[in-house]
Image (tube, rainbow, N blue to C red):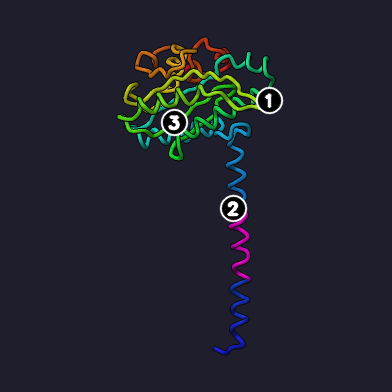
């Protein structure tokens, strides 16, 4: 091989590599855009459809060490009316951030709509009670806003595959939702049992709660 041929070969390899590099960059940008499209822009949590898919995968793969939590802001309309919508947005963002912190990188957090959130965290059974107590304390901390603090109350309900005897996400959500309603405004997490999953529901939510009168298939 002559030295004159080396630059030509190098140029040929470079010419082949450039389209590959361009495609890799394009794929990376596309993946980022698709990921962002599945995120709620205010809270950074997953949108409902993406959360549902991720949560069910986690349940199927790790049924023995996962906890599902539903969270609902208390008196959210009053907070909006008193402090303004920007304050309400700050409260929602704080809920999303705190749930994400609690669930950790192996979990999944989603905004179901309005002031309702869901989180699925991988936690060993022996640590679940303590972690849920920590979450209850975390969620009631006031939210820094402008020059002061916003009061924040969040109702929480939890369900595990072991307690409900299923890994079906809609069933677990129904149980956690019913438990959450049972402990509304109590400042604690109510852990669901099988009786909480037996209530009538629409779209996986307790029948009669706000929003379940919308068109949907009964679970």
Residue 26's place in the image compared with 194, above or below, is below
Q: Say if the magenta span includes residue 20.
A: yes
Q: Are marks 2 and 1 in contact (CB under 8 Å)?
A: no
Looking at the image, which residue sits at the far left? 126
Residue 27, label in figure: 2
Label 3 vs 1, first from the N-terminus:
1
Picture coordinates of residue 97, whole percent (x, y): 54, 32
Picture coordinates of residue 173, whole percent (x, y): 45, 22
Label 2 vs 3, first from the N-terminus:
2
Image quarter where the N terminus lies is bottom right
Magenta segment boundaries in residue numbering: 15-26
Residue 86, label in figure: 1
Q: Is residue 98 left or right of residue 168?
A: right
Residue 99's place in the image compared with 180, above or below, is below
Foreground residue, 25 or 200?
A: 25
Looking at the image, which residue sits at the far bottom? 2
Residue at the location (68% across, 25% down)? 86
Q: Say if the magenta span includes residue 28.
A: no
Q: Characterize the magenta stretch by its predominant secondary structure.
A: helix
Residue at the location (44% across, 31% down)? 120
Q: Are marks 2 and 3 in contact (CB under 8 Å)?
A: no
What's the CA distance linking mark 2 and mark 3?
Answer: 29 Å
Dividing the picture into quadrants, the one containing residue 132 is top left
């Amino acid at each position: 091989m002559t030295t004159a041929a080396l630059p030509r070969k190098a140029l040929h390899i470079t010419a082949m590599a450039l389209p590959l590099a361009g495609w890799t960059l394009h794929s990376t940008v596309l993946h980022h855009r698709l990921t962002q499209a599945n995120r709620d822009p205010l809270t950074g949590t997953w949108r409902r459809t993406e959360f549902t898919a991720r949560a069910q995968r986690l349940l199927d793969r790790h049924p023995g060490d996962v906890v599902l939590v539903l969270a609902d802001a208390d008196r959210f309309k009053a907070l909006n009316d008193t402090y303004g919508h920007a304050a309400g947005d700050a409260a929602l963002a704080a809920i999303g951030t705190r749930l994400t912190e609690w669930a950790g990188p192996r979990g999944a957090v989603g905004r179901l709509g309005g002031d309702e959130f869901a989180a699925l965290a991988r936690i060993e059974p022996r640590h679940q009670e303590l972690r849920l107590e920590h979450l209850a304390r975390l969620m009631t901390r006031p939210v820094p806003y402008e020059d002061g603090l916003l009061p924040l109350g969040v109702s929480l309900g939890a369900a595990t595959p072991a307690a409900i005897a299923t890994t079906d996400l809609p069933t677990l959500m129904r149980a956690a939702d019913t438990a959450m309603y049972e402990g509304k405004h109590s400042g604690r997490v109510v852990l669901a049992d099988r009786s909480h999953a037996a209530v009538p529901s629409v779209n996986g939510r307790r029948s009669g709660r706000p929003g379940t009168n919308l068109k949907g298939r009964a679970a």
